[in-house]
Amino acid sequence: MTDANAAAEKATLRHYLDSGHRALEWKLEGLSERDARRPMTPTGTNLLGLVKHVASTEAEYLGACFGHPFPEPMPWMDDDAEPNSDMWATADESIGDVLAFYRRVQAHSDATVEALPLDAPGVVPWWGTPEVTLHRVLVHVIAETDRHAGHADIVRELLDGAVGLGATNSNLPDRDAAWWGAYVAHLDELAEKAGDIHQVPETDAG
């Protein structure tokens, strides 16, 4: 691969990672401290915790795994930390604090990616095959970020109905509330009909 092609591929990867960063940050915009922390699933998924988790894992993947450790302590990631403690923010950690942490992680990641070629070797100790390249880890971090951005989409919609990729892009058809109500009712009707059509016959257990 030529230097120009390698630079273009790196720029593409960085573009998609940055898009994931911006999408996740926007999911916290306009929320109260309470709503940002509200657990919205039976396993406690909450928006501020999602952002804290994504920031923390990126700090490790694009930091220590390439000999460039993130310089701040992250006690919630320690082996002896309370289980799942990277998935929620303490009462003392504000939305602004978590976002500022995430942006410092992003700057640290940028420095790692800028300094190394895509085929630079690294080690992910918690993987079964720990020897990796920067290219592979960048793809993994993009996938991880977008996976959790999808979680954040659903959590934010459940909180206040806000949807989309950003403030100016809902990524949905431009329809009013009545249309969406009818649309959801239609899907519910289809679900009921499909349940009747594909119902598995009961067998005689005797």
Image (spheres, rainbow, N blue to C red):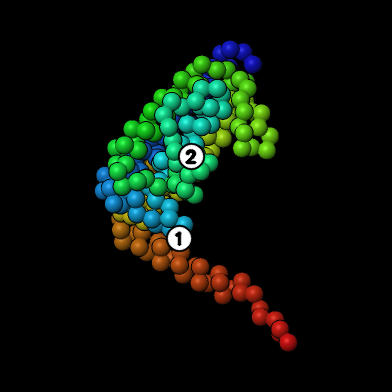
Above or below for 192 versus 84: below
Choose between 80 and 206: the one closer to the eye: 80
| Disc 1 and disc 2 in contact, CB within 8 angstroms | no
Q: Amino acid at mark 2?
A: Met
Above or below for 189 versus 148: below
Which mark, by number, is residue 77? Answer: 2
Residue 96: horizontal and vertical position, in percent? 29, 37
Name the residue at the right extreme.
Answer: 206
Residue 127: horizontal and vertical position, in percent? 64, 37
Q: Quadrant of the C terminus?
A: bottom right
SS under mark 2 = helix
Which mark, by number, is residue 42? Answer: 1
Mark 1 or mark 2: which is in front? Answer: 2
User: As drawn, is 37 to the left or to the right of 59?
Assistant: left
* Distance from the alpha carbon under mark 1 to that under mark 2: 22 Å
Rendering quarter of residue 196: bottom right
